[in-house]
Amino acid sequence: AQSVTQLDSHVSVSEGTPVLLRCNYSSSYSPSLFWYVQHPNKGLQLLLKYTSAATLVKGINGFEAEFKKSETSFHLTKPSAHMSDAAEYFCVVSEAGGFKTIFGAGTRLFVKA
Amino acid sequence: KAGVTQTPRYLIKTRGQQVTLSCSPISGHRSVSWYQQTPGQGLQFLFEYFSETQRNKGNFPGRFSGRQFSNSRSEMNVSTLELGDSALYLCASSLAETRGTGELFFGEGSRLTVL
C-alpha cells in the first residue's frame, strides 16, 4: 500500500539560508513522486517530479529533490530561501496505473527576513 | 493555453442545501480529479474521471457525486450539506492516460462555506 509522510508540519528559515523539507514514502511498486507548492488561497503548482529517471530531480524556482530508494525518502531542498518561498508544500506519491494518488499532510514553510 | 478553471470561486450555503461545482480542464486533458482540502484533514481525494467514466473514488459518502461531460468539463455535487463540508474543493486535470504518471494541473479551487 502507498503512503507518504512529511516529517515536519512547519519549517521556519531565514531568508538566504538553505531549505530542507522532508518526505518519506511507502510504495509496493516503483513510484512516481512529486512535490507541489500551494500559496494562500491558490491551487497547487508542480515544483518537480521523479518518474524513475535521474535520482536527483531539478525543479522550478531553484528547488531540487533526491530520490533515495534505500531510505524511501524524497526530500526537497533549496540552497537559499527567498521570501516568496513562504507557502505550503506537499509531497505526493502515486503508482503508474495505480488507483490512488496520495498527498502528504503538507509542510508549511515560513521565511523570516 | 488557459489553465484549469473552477467556478464559483466562493460560495456560502446553509445546512441541508445542495451545491454544484464546475471545473473546466486544460484543453486536451481528459483526466479530471477532485479533492477536498480542510485544515483538519488536509487534501483528500474525492474522485477521478477519464473520458466521461469515473475510474476511481475516494472514501466519501454518497452525498458527494460527480460527472464528466464529453468535452471533459466536470461537475461535482454535494447534497444535503453538512457543516463539515466547508472546505476548499480543488479540481485538477492531467494529460496522462495512465493513472498516476502525469503532472496534475490544479485550479484555484472553490471555497465552500456551510452555515
Image: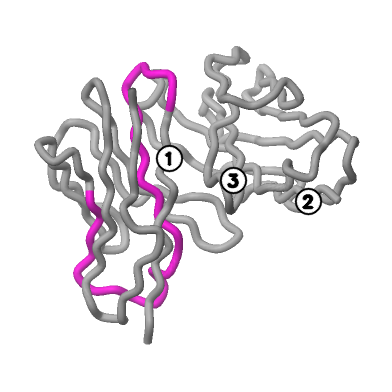
Q: Are marks 1 and 2 in contact (CB under 8 Å)?
A: no
The residue located at (45%, 37%) in the rendering is: B104
> Could one spot residue B1 in this view of the protein?
no
Image coordinates of residue B41 in percent, x first then y, are: 56, 45
Q: Are marks 1 and 3 in contact (CB under 8 Å)?
A: no
Quarter of the image where one finds residue A16: bottom left
Of callouts 3 and 2, which one flags the residue occurring earlier in the amino acid sequence?
3
Image coordinates of residue A11 in percent, x first then y, are: 35, 67
Q: Name the kind of residue labelled 2 in the image.
A: Thr
Dot 1: chain letter: A
**Local secondary structure at mark 3:** strand
Image coordinates of residue B25 in percent, x first then y, are: 59, 34
Q: Name the kind of residue labelled 3 in the image.
A: Gln
Say whether mark 2 and mark 3 are on the same chain: yes
Return the residue at label 3.
B37
Q: Name the kind of residue labelled 1 in the image.
A: Phe
C-alpha distance separating marks 3 and 2: 12 Å
Return the residue at label 2.
B113
Dot 2: chain letter: B
Q: Are marks 3 and 2 in contact (CB under 8 Å)?
A: no
Query: Left of A29 or right of it: where is A98?
Result: right
> Could one spot residue A108 in this view of the protein?
yes
**Local secondary structure at mark 1:** strand
Q: Which mark is residue B108?
A: none
The residue located at (33%, 44%) in the rendering is: A5
Q: Is residue B115 above or below residue B103?
A: below
C-alpha distance separating marks 1 and 3: 11 Å
C-alpha distance separating marks 1 and 2: 23 Å
Quarter of the image where one finds residue A88: bottom left
Return the residue at label 1.
A103
Q: Is residue A36 magenta?
A: no
